[in-house]
Structure formats: C-alpha cells, structure tokens
Image (cartoon, grey):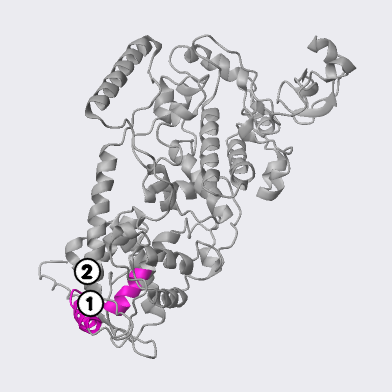
C-alpha cells in the first residue's frame, strides 16, 4: 500500500538527494534513507482524516525498530545516553532551573555532539561499502544548518513542542544497515545493544560516558548562568536528586541491558571535581562552542555574590564581605572578561567560580587575622574581654567561632561517612553479562530482597529513609534546631582601624615561588605539617563545604596571592621560611 502511494512521487530528498519515500502515521512523506519528514502529505479520503493523530510526536521518526521476544528493541548506545540526559534535564527543571535547559540548551548541545561524531545531522549517511576519498568526504559532510552553532537559532529549527529528546536518534549520520550486518550476530549473544561490543573497543575521541552526561548538564547550567555550581551539581548527584548512579533504571524496559552494556552505564564511584573540570573543557572544545554569556555583577557566579553565600554558610561576619570585594577588585577577579567562560581560550580552561570565592575569603582572613597560630588567638582574647562588658555591638571572637565550626564539621562529617557507608551501588534491575545466567541472578536477587524485607520487619525499621530536599547549603545557621552561635552580625571592630585599614602589615605566603612548569603538581603537594593549624582548619572547612580536596582550595589561594602581592601589596612584610644551606658536595 505504501509503495502505491509513493510510486508517482519522484522528487529527490532535500537532505540526502535519494528517492526512497515512505509515509508516516500522520500521512506525511519521509525519506527512508535519512528519515527526513517533508511537507508533502498523502492524499486521503475525508473519512480517514478523523482517525489520524493531529499532533506530531517528533520531528524525526528515528529508527524503524523490530521488536524481538527476548532481546527487546534494537537500540544503540547513544540512544541509552539520550534517555539519561533527558531524565537529568527534567530533574534540573524540577529544582527550579530555567525550562530552556532541556529543549533549547542541552538538546542543542547533544545535537552538536551527534553531528561532530557523524552519528546524526549530517548531509549524507556514511556507507562502509563505499571506498575512495571522494565518496568518504561527501558522505560525512556536516549539515550546514548546525555548523554555525547558536542556542537561539538552532532552537527554531524544530517544530513547536518537538525535541530530539522526544524522538529516537535519527539515522541520517550513520549506516544503520551496515551496523546491523556487522553486529547483528553479536546483538543476540554478547550485548543487548546493537553496537555495545563495538563501542567498548572503539577508540574515538571523547566517547560518551556517565561523567560526560554531567559535563552536558554543567555546560547547560553555565550557559543559562544558573545558581548551581559544579560542586553543587556533584552534591546533588550524591544525594540522588540527579540521575547518575543506577542509571540503567532510567532506560526503558524495552531496551535490554546486558553484556558490555553494563560496563558502559554502570557507575561504581562518584566523579571528582578536578576530573569533571577536564571533562567539561574537553567537551566544550570538542563542540567548538562560542564564548558563553558574560558573568556580570548581577549573576550568581560573580565572586561578590558567591562570597556572600559562603560567608553565610561558614558562619562568618558580614563585614568580611567588604574585604573579599577589595581583594577581588585588586587582583581583577571581578573582571567580566576573566569570569566569562570561553572554550576557544586554551590558556583559561573551566573557571572554578566556587573555589575562587572561598579562596578570596581565606586571603581576607589572613589579611585580618594572619592565621599564624598566634595573632588570631591574641585578637580573640581581646574580643572576649570586650564582649564581657556588653558595650555596643559584639566583636567577632575567632576562638568561639572555631569551637562552633569544629563541632558542626565533626557532626556533619560523621553523618556523611555513615551515609556513604550505607550507599547501595546495586541496581534495582537484574543485570547479567549473558542470557545463560539471567534466571540464576534473578532468583538470587529475589531471595535477597525477601530476606531484607523480613529482617526489616523483625528489626522494626523502615526499608528506606526519606530523601532530603535539594539544597546548595551544607550548613543552615538560620535553623533554630542547631542551637549554635551565629556570627553573621558580629563586627570586626578592634581588628581594623576607623579608616578601614589593617594595623598590621605582616603576611605569610602559602607559596613563595610560582611554578612555571607545564607539568606543575604543586597543587597536590599540600602538606599539613608545613602550615599553621589555624590556616589548615580554615582550609579544611571550605574544602568540606565544597566537597573537594584541601589541595584544590590551597592551590587557588596561592594563585590569588601571586597576583595580590605582585600588584598592590608591595609594602607588606612577608614572612619567609629560611632556606636550607647547600652542601659542599651538591652540584
């Protein structure tokens, strides 16, 4: 019936220039080679009009799937990651992120990725049977509509309400029939997906992984300048608010996962901050993204705004924000050109906005309290004697603040360790590496589940704990249940003079010499024994708030000090450690 309806239409496809037409459920013509839908419709009777679905479900029809009894639908690895990206975008939307993140931003990033890898959105399909440089170059020619990347323009290429997330992966970029012929025998024996076995062995640049899905999320958030930093994103992943662990449960049941697919989608650890920074920059450079929207003073990622947030969370006085702003202005960290992410600038990679903010706070604390295990305690004793007289505003007492924060950190660290120990990495789905062990693993899992339910009833405990609401704060000092002292309203009087200057000019540097080597590793060479205990405590406090290693924050403090003392504070007396004398036998 379809051949009779399309027999008289001989116009070539505007996308791939082939004459191979089919008819969709909405009676529109689509190319069977590249699945491009055109405006031409089938001539139907008036009685059949009412039986058609008036809404277009997707712009691209995707793969013509053949359902199998045991192996499920035929699917590709990129389709599995697309389902996960969709769930992650929907999770961010539920947290109040701009609705554009799914269909306008992340969708276009994903389309760009598929085009760069020649998977989809190219002018012609790659054919493994074709040979010769001329054929190879013409078959992988990218679509000119996506070459000039723009979130605003590319969003208008799809129909209203349509999204690549709502459709299957279009097959215009790869030879699906060729993949089926190569991996057809592998699909039913070793892998649930069509290309699972080949995907593991493939050494293409920037392959998709679960960490790469978070890179897509962060680039989308950064483009929209949302109030979720990279450390906040990783914390939301740990708390289970963003799909990451047990990702296979977000893939439809019809897409069977077993064999090599398990290694691709299964997660056994949480991503580290430094690793994610590299992944994000690699993805942005691979996609050839333009300069991101500028980070102005009104944006959440501006250092003045982030410093206010972390001063509140660290329970520090509000007056300290004046000093963090001065330091940021002196070293130029409030410059829009330096704050705006530009993937084309190879020297300036992913900007650690939250780490820069806490580093500014630490430098300000060193300017005021020195943090040399002597000056800060002397100032604390003066503030304690002054506060006992109850005259005027309360002076900030470093010693009392230290006790309050030490107790809060120890308690939170204990709860975090217990939560991590109870964390379950096992999937709710039955994952098996071959169909032979499917029944055995299913039986074992059901037995373990029944035993767990029985022990829970005997112990009188609930099977699961209630998930906490998402929040970017670790400590909330406005909560009356904490019962701790809040230092936000305390003043720095007695530490600074009336003209706003610091009476002391002594300052010790965290690093006396900047390493200029391309393979510099001084950011991982932080040793606790070489620094005062007060500085180490402040460093560990902010590293705990950001869930990063102390060496990451220490490295950023060193970077700010390099710029601070080179430009403005030439007259400050810097305490230097004595250099060891060279031996006579050394070269």
Overall secondary structure of the magenta stretch? helix
Q: Residues within 10 Å of mark 1 (few under 14, many from 20)?
A: many
Residue 62 sits inside the magenta stretch:
no
Name the side, left or right, on which 181 lies relative to 45. Answer: left
Secondary structure state at the residue bearing disc 1: helix
Work out whether 221 lies above or below 143: below
- Marks 1/2 in contact by CB < 8 Å: the verdict is yes
State the residue in front, 439 or 393: 393
Residue 371 sits inside the magenta stretch:
yes
- Indicate which disc, 1 or 2, sits on the residue closer to the N terminus: 1
Q: Quadrant of the C terminus?
A: bottom left
Camera sees residue 520: no
Q: Give the range drawn in magenta.
A: 361-388
Q: On the image, numbered disc 2 is attached to which residue? A: 534
Image spot of residue 577 (x, y percent)? 19, 75
Q: Quadrant of the N terminus?
A: top right
**Residue at image x 73%, y 39%?**
160
**Residue at image x 54%, y 62%?**
340
Work out whether 70 lies above or below 34: above
Secondary structure state at the residue bearing disc 2: helix
User: Residue 496, labelled with which disc?
Assistant: none
Name the side, left or right, on which 397 lies relative to 239. Answer: left
């Amino acid at each position: 019936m379809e051949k009779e309806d399309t027999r008289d239409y001989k116009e070539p496809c505007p996308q791939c220039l082939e004459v191979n037409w089919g008819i969709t459920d909405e009676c529109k013509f689509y190319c069977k080679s590249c699945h491009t839908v055109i405006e031409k419709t089938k001539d139907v009777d008036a009685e059949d009009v009412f039986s058609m679905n008036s809404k277009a479900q997707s712009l691209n029809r995707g793969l013509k799937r053949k359902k199998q009894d045991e192996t499920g639908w035929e699917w590709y690895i990129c389709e599995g990651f697309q389902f996960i990206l969709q769930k992650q975008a929907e999770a961010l939307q539920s947290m109040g992120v701009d609705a554009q993140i799914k269909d306008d931003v992340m969708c276009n990033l994903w389309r760009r990725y598929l085009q760069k890898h020649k998977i989809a959105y190219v002018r012609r399909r790659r054919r493994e049977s074709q040979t010769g440089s001329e054929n190879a170059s013409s078959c992988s020619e990218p679509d000119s509509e996506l070459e000039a990347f723009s979130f605003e323009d590319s969003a208008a290429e799809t129909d209203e309400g349509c999204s690549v997330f709502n459709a299957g992966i279009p097959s215009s970029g790869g030879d699906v029939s060729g993949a089926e012929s190569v991996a057809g025998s592998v699909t039913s024996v070793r892998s649930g997906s069509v290309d699972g076995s080949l995907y593991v062995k493939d050494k293409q640049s920037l392959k998709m992984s679960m960490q790469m899905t978070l890179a897509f999320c962060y680039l989308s958030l950064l483009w929209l300048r949302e109030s979720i930093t990279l450390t906040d994103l990783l914390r939301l992943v740990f708390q289970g608010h963003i799909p990451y662990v047990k990702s296979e449960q977000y893939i439809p049941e019809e897409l069977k996962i077993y064999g090599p697919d398990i290694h691709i989608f299964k997660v056994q650890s949480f991503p580290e901050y430094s690793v994610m920074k590299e992944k994000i920059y690699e993805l942005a450079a691979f996609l050839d993204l333009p300069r991101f929207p500028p980070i102005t003073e009104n944006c959440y990622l501006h250092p003045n705004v982030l410093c206010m947030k972390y001063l509140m969370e660290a329970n520090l006085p509000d007056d300290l924000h004046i000093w963090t702003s001065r330091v940021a202005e002196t070293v130029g960290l409030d410059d829009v050109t330096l704050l705006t992410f530009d993937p084309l600038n190879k020297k300036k990679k992913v900007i650690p906005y939250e780490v820069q903010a806490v580093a500014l706070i630490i430098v300000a604390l060193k300017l005021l309290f020195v943090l040399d295990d002597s000056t800060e305690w002397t100032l604390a004793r003066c503030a304690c004697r002054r506060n006992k007289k109850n005259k005027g505003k309360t002076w900030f007492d470093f010693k009392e603040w230290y006790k309050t924060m030490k107790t809060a950190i120890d308690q939170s660290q204990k709860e975090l360790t217990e939560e991590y120990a109870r964390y379950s990495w096992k999937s709710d789905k039955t994952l098996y590496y071959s169909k032979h062990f499917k029944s055995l693993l299913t039986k074992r899992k059901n037995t373990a589940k029944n035993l767990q339910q029985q022990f829970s009833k005997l112990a009188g405990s609930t099977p699961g704990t209630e998930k906490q609401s998402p929040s970017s704060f670790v400590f909330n000092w406005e909560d009356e249940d904490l019962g701790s002292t809040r230092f936000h309203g305390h003043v720095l009087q007695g530490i600074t003079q009336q003209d706003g200057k610091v009476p002391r000019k002594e300052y010790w540097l965290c690093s006396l010499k900047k390493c200029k080597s391309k393979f510099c590793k001084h950011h991982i060479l932080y040793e606790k024994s070489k620094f005062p205990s007060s500085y180490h405590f402040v460093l560990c406090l902010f590293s705990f708030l950001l869930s990063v290693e102390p060496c990451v924050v220490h490295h950023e403090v060193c970077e700010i000090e390099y710029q601070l003392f080179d430009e403005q504070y030439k007259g400050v007396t810097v305490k230097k450690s004595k250099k060891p004398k060279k031996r006579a036998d050394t070269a």
